[in-house]
Image (spheres, rainbow, N blue to C red):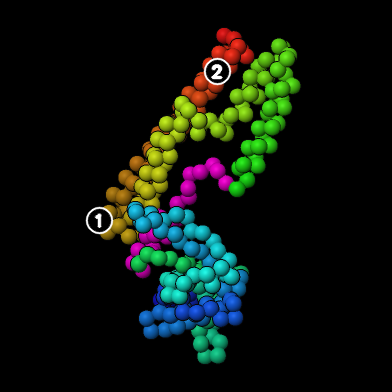
Amino acid sequence: MYRQKDSDNTKFRFTGGIESITDGKTLWVRGEDLTIPVSLADTKCYLLPMHEGDGFPDAPEQINWNQVSTLTEGAKVFIGGMTRSENSRLNFISTKENPLMVIFYSCSDDDLPPAVIRAAGTHNEYWNTITPISLVIGALALIYIAASYVERPAFRLTFISSFIAVFIPLLPVIPPGFLLTVIYRRLTWSARILRSDYDLARFGLLPDFTQKSARKFAIRAYSLEIFAWIIMLLGIFANIIFIYMILIFFKVISF
């Protein structure tokens, strides 16, 4: 167990393996020479997934305390937070002022800090749980607008704008601009790795790089991100031109 002195409180860090779960919400963690209980009530638990190929973790997945029982005995866990003595035994507890951090992981203890820092980088994605609903509602509204003005020549520009806008969310993933989207995703992934390397160097977890020399990681990351967005915009522009040519081909619009 490691102790970190704060201004008014003492925080502890503890790593070990799951020994058992009692009362449905008390996790017993076994270290090298100590077993300590952790109250999972009102505690946010995270699962740190790792890729076997490149060792680059995904973003931590928050799990409920009642899901911890599905983890196998001996699974590695990191606990950080406040403790208090109950029945002559230290217990990790979570409070509103000092929430407890519980991370389940599969990498080695030495690789845990770099893995957490790498996982802290957010994914550059526009797809989430409400995206499909938003796309359907937006597409139906735009189709309705386009259909309302298709027979009215005075509102031809409104019809064209509405028709093209239906495809805007899909522009990054349809030909011919899809190839540029693939390049964009690859560049943003490389930029994410460089940003995490910069963070690792700042915390001294890359011993061959000083903070000053490690700034090149940040510079390269920002440069890649700017270039990636230029590539993405070019792909969207190419698809807009493609849709425009389709409208001309079917004589919906003319030059």
Residue 54 seen in the current view:
yes
Badge 2 density bin: few <14, some 14–19, many ≥20, Cα 10 Å = few
Q: Which of the 4 image quadrants contains residue 209?
A: bottom left
Taking the view exactly as shown, the residue that stands out farthest to the front is: 250
Give the distance between the C-alpha atoms of the residues marked 2 and 1, in whole angstroms.
55 Å
Taking the view exactly as shown, the residue that stands out farthest to the top is: 255
| Picture residue at 60% right of the left edge, 48% below the top | 129
Q: Is residue 198 above or below residue 75?
A: above
Q: Is residue 193 left or right of residue 234?
A: left
Residue 83 seen in the current view:
no
Q: Is residue 221 above or below residue 12?
A: above
Q: Is residue 69 left or right of residue 77?
A: right
Q: Tell me the element at label 2.
A: helix
Q: Which callout, 2 or 1, points at the residue further toward the start of the chain?
A: 1
Q: Give the quarter of the figure containing the C terminus.
A: top right
Q: Tell me the element at label 1.
A: loop
Q: Position of residue 161 (x, y in %)?
A: 63, 22
Q: Position of residue 108 (x, y in %)?
A: 35, 67
- Boundaries of the magenta span: 109-128
Q: Is residue 225 above or below residue 111?
A: above
| Picture residue at 27% right of the left edge, 59% below the top | 207
Query: Disc 2 marks which residue?
Result: 246
Residue 157 colored in magenta in the image? no
Q: Position of residue 214 (x, y in %)?
A: 31, 50
Q: Name the magenta segment's main secondary structure.
A: loop
| Picture residue at 47% right of the left edge, 55% below the top | 59
The one nearer the camera, 240 or 227, is: 240
Taking the view exactly as shown, the residue that stands out farthest to the bottom is: 88
Query: Disc 1 marks which residue?
Result: 208
Q: Which of the 4 image quadrants contains residue 39?
A: bottom right
Q: Is residue 135 left or right of residue 224?
A: right
Identified by mark 2, the residue type is Ile
